[in-house]
Image (cartoon, rainbow, N blue to C red):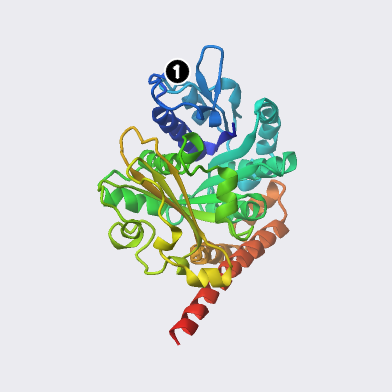
Amino acid sequence: MQEIIIIGIGQCGINLGLEFIKQLNYDHCLNNVQEISDYNRYKKKINVFYNENSKQQYIPRCLFLDLEPSSIDKLYQQKDVIIDPNCCFSMNCGSSNNFAIGKYTDGAELMDKCKHVLNKYFERSDNLQGIMMFFSTGGGSGSGIASNLIYYFREKDLTKIVHCNPVFPQGISHNSLEIYNTILIMHSMIETVDIVTLYDNVALQNMCNRNFLPSNYENYNKIIAESLIQTTASYRFPGFINGGMKKLSLNLIPFPRLHFLQSKYMIVNQMDWNMNDILKDQYKLCSSEDNLSNEYLSYQIQMRGNCFGMPESPTLLIKKENLYQFIGIDNHQRVHTNVQHRDHENIVGFLGNSIGFHKYIKKYLDDFSHMFRRKAFVYIYEYTGMDEMEFIEAESNLQDLSSEYRQYSQSYDDYDEEAEF
């Protein structure tokens, strides 16, 4: 069995991690006391996210951290999810939206309290795959403590997969320090994280508006959790093509620093389906562009349901001749599980390593440069122990990442021009 630890950090991370656990409970038919209510449901791999106790209750393998006690207190008040209180830690202070407080001062003290829980998970796990972290890049607690945890796990065991699911503010900002916090945690994620699945408040807001849902954080969390339920379905249920965190990292990360993925999913109601229709023509799951390989270094299609049957030959999918030419490998992977979702018969998910990621981070780099050039608010970080050189290193690292993505994007453009000529 390959186990995974769920870690929620800060108010955003705790709420998102809790919603993910609720949907896991629903998908595995667990009732309010974490007991299986439907034994016809396949449960062989339920231990991926749960530990079974002597009462045959499945308790989620999780850890929740925050510098403010309010979010942790709400966890104890949950009536439909049982969370081990020994896995929840807080302090009677706040981060003041400051990355340095979350990493160097109060956040470092909180890390000392939770390390024994993490070590216990390591010792009790037969085959730990890695961790899934939830946090907001703009928050002081989320970004600062997440940076500490990332480095701790790297020192603990290099073979474990660190999968971060950060939420970026991108236009929905409540504090000027969010730009600094985002750049600083991005520096940690570039160097030491294996997989990063990106979520953006603006994109989530647009999705709610298109589906006539109220634009609030509760609905944002549900959308993200539903996406992750689809992504992890092949971890938790059987199928003729199974997946895991290590397989995901191996198949979708052609270059170690380029590990930032975009997630999408959709419900397929029709029986007479075609993969090209789902990807491009009718549903436009991944993009409205004509050529997948001009947009993605690699991508994975995640099928869940009974209507898909055996997978098609890869030659029937969209050809990526320029990617074969440039990288020398097929950048397409698929996973499948035939255990249906309780509410939907067939679901198709998509994870893509987008070449256009450099356009996204350019906005953050521009905002960061405007502020840092004038040393705006830098003294707040220096007062809590940070050095100005950390800002410079983080900016330089992000610029290098942007250049790497842009390099492959330009290479594809050049190849297309040569082909047309």
Answer above or below: position of 403 versus 40: below
Residue at image coords 49%, 34%: 236
Residue appearing at x 51%, y 15% in the figure: 56
Residue 237 in the image: x percent, y percent? 46, 34
Q: Is residue 111 above or below residue 330?
A: above
Q: Is residue 412 above or below residue 164?
A: below
Residue situated in front as seen by the camera: 377 or 88: 88
Residue 144 picture location, percent across and down: 62, 44
Whether residue 135 is visible, yes or no, is yes
Task: Please state, as top left, top right, bottom left or bottom right, where the N terminus lies in the image.
Answer: top right
Query: Residue 214 sits in which quadrant?
Result: top left
Q: Is residue 154 left or right of residue 271?
A: right
The residue under the point 52% across, 69% down is 323
What is the x, y in percent for residue 304? Answer: 39, 42
Give residue 25's quadrant in the image. top left
Residue at the farthest top position = 55
Mark 1 residue element:
loop
Q: Amino acid at mark 1?
A: Glu
261 or 174, nearer to the observer:
261
Residue 139 visible somewhere in the drawing:
no
Task: State the image coordinates of residue 396 (x, y, percent, origin top left).
Answer: 66, 65
- Residue tagged 1: 35
* Left or right of residue 374, residue 357 in this image: left
User: In the visual, does 44 lie left or right of 256?
Assistant: left
Which quadrant: the C terminus? bottom left
Name the one closer to the observer, 12 or 30: 30
Which residue is situated farthest in the right direction here?
A: 155
Local crowd at mark 1 within 10 Å, few (<14), some, or many (≥20)?
A: some
